[in-house]
C-alpha cells in the first residue's frame, strides 16, 4: 500500500500575525519570525529523514513494502535538495548585499 505523499506546508513569514497598513513590524520582529520559519522547515526536513530511516529499518525487518521505503527516501532527498538550494540563494543574496557599495 502506498502512503499519501505530503509536502512541506508553506507559511507566511509573518507567522499568522495580522499586519495592517498602519502598523509596521520592526526589523527584530521580522528577523525572529523568519528564523522561526527556517527552524520549523529544518525540523520538518529532519523528521522526513528520520521517517526514511524508520521505513528502511521496517523494510529490513519485513514489516514495510519497498515502495514505502522508496517514497520516504525520495521525500527526504527532495526536501534536503530544496533546503540546500534555499541556503545557496540566501548565501548569494548575502554576498550581493556585501558587494554593494554605499
Image (cartoon, grey):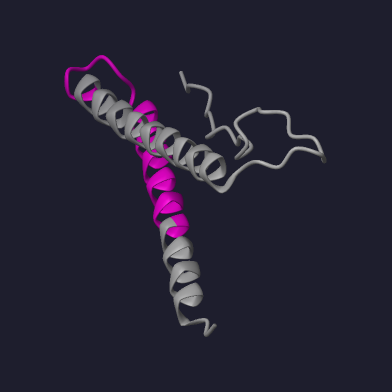
Give the residue drawn at x 41%, y 57%.
87
Q: Nearer the viewer, residue 49 or 65?
A: 49
Give the residue drawn at x 31%, y 34%.
49
Q: x and y percent of residue 91 in the render? A: 42, 66
Picture layout, residue 9 above or below residue 61: below
- Choose top left, top right, bottom left or bottom right for residue 58: top left
Q: Quadrant of the C terminus?
A: bottom right
Q: Residue furthest right?
A: 21
Q: Which residues are magenta?
A: 59-86
40 in magenta: no
74 in magenta: yes
- Choose top left, top right, bottom left or bottom right for residue 15: top right
Q: Nearer the viewer, residue 48 or 56?
A: 48
Q: How many marks?
A: 0
Q: x and y percent of residue 95 in the render? A: 43, 74
Q: Nearer the viewer, residue 5 or 91?
A: 91
Give the residue drawn at x 80%, y 35%.
20
Name the chief secondary structure element in magenta: helix
Q: x and y percent of residue 44 in the render? A: 41, 32
Amino acid at each position: 500500500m502506498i502512503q499519501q505523499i505530503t509536502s512541506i506546508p508553506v507559511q507566511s513569514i509573518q507567522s499568522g500575525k495580522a499586519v495592517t497598513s498602519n502598523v509596521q513590524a520592526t526589523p527584530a520582529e521580522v528577523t525572529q519570525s523568519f528564523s522561526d520559519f527556517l527552524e520549523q522547515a529544518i525540523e520538518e526536513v529532519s523528521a522526513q529523514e528520520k521517517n526514511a530511516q524508520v521505513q528502511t529499518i521496517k523494510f529490513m525487518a519485513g514489516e514495510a513494502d519497498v515502495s514505502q521505503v522508496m517514497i520516504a527516501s525520495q521525500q527526504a532527498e527532495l526536501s534536503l535538495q530544496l533546503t540546500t538550494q534555499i541556503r545557496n540563494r540566501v548565501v548569494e543574496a548575502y554576498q550581493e548585499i556585501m558587494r554593494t557599495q554605499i
